[in-house]
Amino acid sequence: MAIPMPAEPAQAEPAQAEPAPTNYQPAPEQPEAPQTPDFQDQSAAGPVPPVQQVPPVQPTQAPIINTQAITSNATVKELTAPAVLQTAGVSLGIGLGSAVVIALISAIVCLAGSSQAFSGMGQFSSVMSYSGMGDLGSMVSGLNFFQLLVMSLIMGVSGAFSLSASAAGISLDSLANVSLSMPVGLSGVALMVGAAFGAYWFAQKSGIRFAWTGAISAAAVGLVTSILYLVLGAVFPLSLSVASGGYGASASLVGATFRTFLMTFLIAGLGALVGYALAQFAPDSSNVFIAAWRWMHRTRGFVRTIAESVMVYAVVFTVIGVIALIAMAISGKDPSALALVFFLFPFLPIATFVIGALGSLDVTITGQQSTGISVFASGMGNARWVFVALVVVFIIATLYIALRAAARNMYDRAYAEWKHSWKSPVAALVAWLVIDFAVASMNVTASVSTQGSFSAAFGPAMWFFLVAAIWAFLVEVVALTFGPTLVTSMPGLWKVFVGGTVQQTPQNVTDYVAACSPKKANAAQQPAQQPSESDTASEQASVDSVGTTPAATTQTWQPPTAVPMSAPIGPDTPDAANATQPIPVTPAQQTTPTQQIPTAAAMPAPTDQVPPTDQVPPTTSATAQMPPVIPPAAPAAPKGKPLTAKQKTGIIIGAVVVGVIAVLGIAYAVLNATVFSPQSVADRYVAALSSGDYEEANNIANPQLDQDQRLLLTNKAAQTENATITNARVTGITDSADGSKLVNVTYTIGGEPVNDTFTMAPYGSQFLIFRDWTVTTPLLKEITVSTDAATPGLTINGVEVGEENAVSGSFGSDLVFKVYPGTYRIAVTETDFITDSGDGPTTVSTNGSTYAYTSVEATDALVQAIQDELDAQLQACAASTEGEPEGCPFSMYTFSEDRYRNVTWSITESPEVDYIDLGSGEFMTSGGEATATYEYRQYDDSWEPDDYTDYIYVYGSFTIDGDQVNVTMDTY
């Protein structure tokens, strides 16, 4: 791709005095807060054509963009305005609501996890209950849902819990003091984001000034939130109690601590502060997320570098954290481990970032040497390769950040100097000091009166802030040295780096920010008068501070090729005093605009044309230019001259090259239309299905099923007679709107023709130049088999299948199997005790009936096995000498046991099994008889022989265990 030459920097014209705007008059009734202009997102709109200039006239009406001075009453009155209070309330409500939702899910997970833990410790609980201490579940007295909810809230903001304990009614707090804090969790992140969202939402609508109304309101939001957290932590402590032998002990974790107050105040207050700030500096957005994105792309210098670094690292290592959590769940075969996302995020992404940045996660315990987890630590085993992969990912992400900064420096030369290279390292150093101490560490401290103090901490190493600063400096080094060369050497990747350039701030946003400045607010309270030169300079400084100039006028916007704009001049811009002055705005330009103002002025940076670094104009204090203008068209070629022999040779060589390219192009076209065409792939796929090579078909089109569910998609299922399709061929391929292909096929099943379709789409490339086509919707069909609960198994086309091979269902219901088009023979797997009760195997086809019904019945061998086991148990009952043998289906009534003796039983008629239910595993018998002979003591104490006959009816259950049948008797 040709790289155009940037235009030479335009010479700075002599500064002209800007005429005072005629519409700069205070309104008769001063508003208490700035009115937000009607911002419309036009970032995707093209350049607005210039309109014809008109002579300066006195405007007859106020402009759409209100840039008048903003009236400000006393600070207290402004803070108590209904709109200000409403905005603070909305920020507080949405922040708390977001945190409660996340904490609610966390509490449910904790509650389910604790129940599972108690059920898994049944033996230990039984021992405790036997010792008189009660079962394990009763230990957690008062552990309810609200306690877990509050615990999740406080843990989410990295609040601290203090331990309070007592035994036998005596408080132990004076003997020991224990404190516990965790890293910031998802509920804390939700609190911050929700507070920012609510503050931006209403502050943007109400036009609330950031300084100082927004800042004080944000502090109020943080204060109220921290007080609520303290109250909840005090009211709902996490309590445990144990009692035994009349003595008891209890302990509770109380979240009402100073750290809880401080961290909640900082997190909620910071979130609201960000929302208020973005409402002023990026008010042309529908929500806080878009506002943050636009602000980041409009800011410059080290602030932009830090913001982009946070964005890139957060995205990359959050994805890595999710992958790590999924890997933990898979390796541990415990899907419930995924619930740890509420407690391990954002700590897990931060931890992987620290390791990737060649840092260390240290475990520090009082009196012991620190133990680190890093790529250099010993004893890592196979985990070291994972850590090396994290380092590689980190280096790639860091290089990407540096190249984006280099692309920005190529257009925004004001900050492409070494004297600014210290700013982002210092900012990174300070940020990581805060993160290490307040966000990403777990701390346990204990103080025992007789043993001294003890502390344990786990988190990034104390020295990691230095490592972070070094990496930030390396980003600056790359951006200022060889970074621009790398960017220009990869023109194909320019669209990847162009996002790092600065987008121009729309003029209406600039005017609004300037109107919100405290100086403007103070000036608005003065008598209405025409602004002086000092006021005009002050307004110009406010305009410059947001990163743009009035050159991009709001009414007659000119493309950059027509008017070279000066670099944005801010308070920290180098040599701002000597920079070129912006183009003056005439009164005619301040009238009501005929075109809507774009939210971002057109800049040459977002194009895919990369300026070579050696053509970038040198940076000078007097010409700190905006991005160089790319010429709209190439210059005209010079008039021709007679060709020399060398030129003729070059033409011949060029013609040969063109011929070779043409031949290669023809060959490419032929191969692309035949060997590497979608038609070729479709023919191979249909041929594989027709020949029964289902495994080759799976390679062409991934069925996207589990391995067990693919059992009928193997070559074994195609071995029976007439199993596969015949006469299969592709009849046509049509293009779809999304670039995919719709393939029409025809084939025969059982002599009947079938028309079918499947889709294909490009997937990667072959040999770097040919498209690789794949089948996206394979020719998969479904067959359904109805089964009994006692069905021992099925065979489909000779392949034994079970419940695990079906995509849905189980024995006793309908089993659904995925198959390729064809015919399938279904039979029940028979055993010695169970056989098919139907007419034998059933055949279904995918073009006809796809439902098969099967049923089973007991064999004579099962009936006999139950009968034999029943007779054996009855004979065991008959050996009893009791009148009422225990667990037996017969008995003899005796009103006084000392009047009966020498009782003997005999089975005079054995009951026979006459009903078996395979589904429920139950059986019933016909009637039988059991006779008891005994001696009965008469009233004269003489013993007379007698007998008694009882009728036997038995019903019970049976189970089949291989070749063994187990029977359990019952009576009725």
Image (cartoon, rainbow, N blue to C red):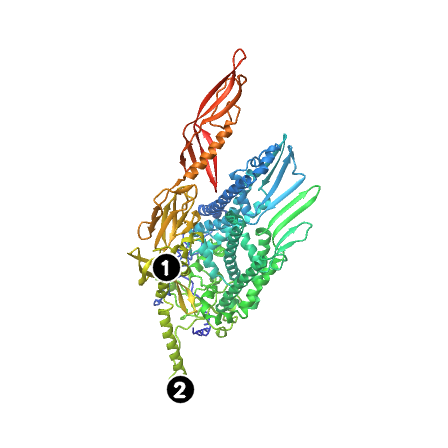
Mark 2 belongs to which amino acid? Lys
| Residue ID at (54%, 13%) | 942
The answer to whether residue 856 is visible is yes
- Mark 2 vs 1: CB contact within 8 A: no
Q: Position of residue 823 (x, y in %)?
A: 34, 53
29 shown above or below 300: above
**Most foreground residue, 593 or 156:** 156
How would you rate the neighbour count of disc 2 (Cα within 10 Å): few for under 14, some for 14-19, many for 20 or more? few
Q: Position of residue 158 (x, y in %)?
A: 56, 48
Name the residue beneath numbered marker 2: 648
Label 2: element kind: helix
- Of the numbered discs in the image, which one, if any, rests on residue 970? none
Name the residue beneath numbered marker 1: 689
The tally of labels here is: 2
Disc 2 or 1, which lies upstream in sequence? 2
How would you rate the neighbour count of disc 1 (Cα within 10 Å): few for under 14, some for 14-19, many for 20 or more? many
**Most foreground residue, 400 or 744:** 744
Displayed quadrant of residue 475: bottom right
Mark 1 belongs to which amino acid? Leu
Q: CA distance from mark 2 to mark 1?
A: 59 Å
Point out the image quarter for the C terminus.
top left
Q: Is residue 297 left or right of residue 440?
A: left
**Most foreground residue, 545 or 59:** 545
919 shown above or below 283: above
